[in-house]
Image: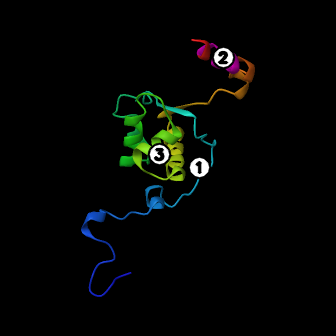
């Protein structure tokens, strides 16, 4: 809303883009649910048939945010870290990750099940051992 003759934001605010504009109005991904601690790693791009990039035949064109995610995920990062690094809402990042997953541009590594973590007894023994030092 405008004040008396002034803009509703100042020049330092930068561009104002609603998060859903980055996702084409989508608010969630219909495929798998991306866990906050799931590790995302960029996959090798699909092989082309020799006529150019494999994505050229597809009507889908990645947005700059997709490219930023792929750049970040050269080393595995969690979904939460990606959202933090890009300063985007988690829901937006999940939709963008879904796009990349649909085009086989990322791999999702699920977090280890709780049963694989050490039990409480083992952790207490480690703490007692550290205190004994």
Numbered tag placed on residue 128 in the rendering: 2
x, y percent for residue 78: 51, 35
Of mark 1 and mark 2, the one earlier in the sequence is 1
> CA separation, marks 1 and 2?
45 Å
Question: How many neighbours does mark 2 have within 10 angstroms: few (below 14), some (14-19), or many (20 or more)?
Answer: few
Residue found 36% across the figure and 65% down from its top: 16
Q: Secondary structure at mark 1?
A: loop
Question: How many neighbours does mark 3 have within 10 angstroms: few (below 14), some (14-19), or many (20 or more)?
Answer: some
Residue found 62% across the figure and 30% down from its top: 111
- In the picture, the quarter occupied by the N terminus is bottom left
Residue nearest the viewer, comparing 79 with 49: 79
Residue found 29% across the figure and 78% down from its top: 7
Residue 74, by quadrant, is: top left
**Residue 83 shows in this picture:** yes
Q: Secondary structure at mark 2?
A: helix
Residue nearest the viewer, comparing 31 with 124: 124
Residue 71, by quadrant, is: top left
Q: Is residue 36 left or right of residue 88?
A: right
User: Magenta residues: mostly which secondary structure?
Assistant: helix
- In the picture, the quarter occupied by the C terminus is top right
Q: Which residue is mark 1?
A: 29
**Residue 62 shows in this picture:** no
Of mark 3 and mark 1, the one earlier in the sequence is 1
In this view, 26 is above or below 29: below
Residue nearest the viewer, comparing 1 with 62: 1
Q: Which residue is mark 3?
A: 83
In this view, 30 is above or below 14: above
Stretch of the chain drawn in magenta: 123-130
In this view, 129 is above or below 107: above
Question: Are dots 3 and 1 in contact, CB under 8 Å?
Answer: no
x, y percent for residue 12: 26, 64
């Amino acid at each position: 809303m405008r004040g008396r003759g002034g803009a509703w934001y100042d020049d330092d605010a930068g561009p104002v883009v609603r998060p859903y504009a980055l996702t084409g109005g989508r608010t969630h991904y219909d495929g798998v649910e991306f866990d906050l601690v799931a590790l995302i790693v960029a996959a090798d791009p699909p092989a082309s048939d020799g006529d150019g990039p494999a994505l050229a035949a597809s009507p889908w064109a990645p947005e700059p945010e997709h490219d930023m995610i792929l750049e970040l995920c050269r080393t595995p990062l969690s979904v939460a870290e990606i959202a933090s690094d890009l300063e985007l809402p988690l829901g937006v990042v999940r939709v963008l990750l879904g796009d990349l997953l649909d085009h086989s541009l990322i791999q999702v590594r699920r977090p280890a099940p709780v049963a694989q973590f050490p039990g409480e007894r083992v952790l207490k023994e480690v703490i007692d051992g550290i205190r004994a030092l």
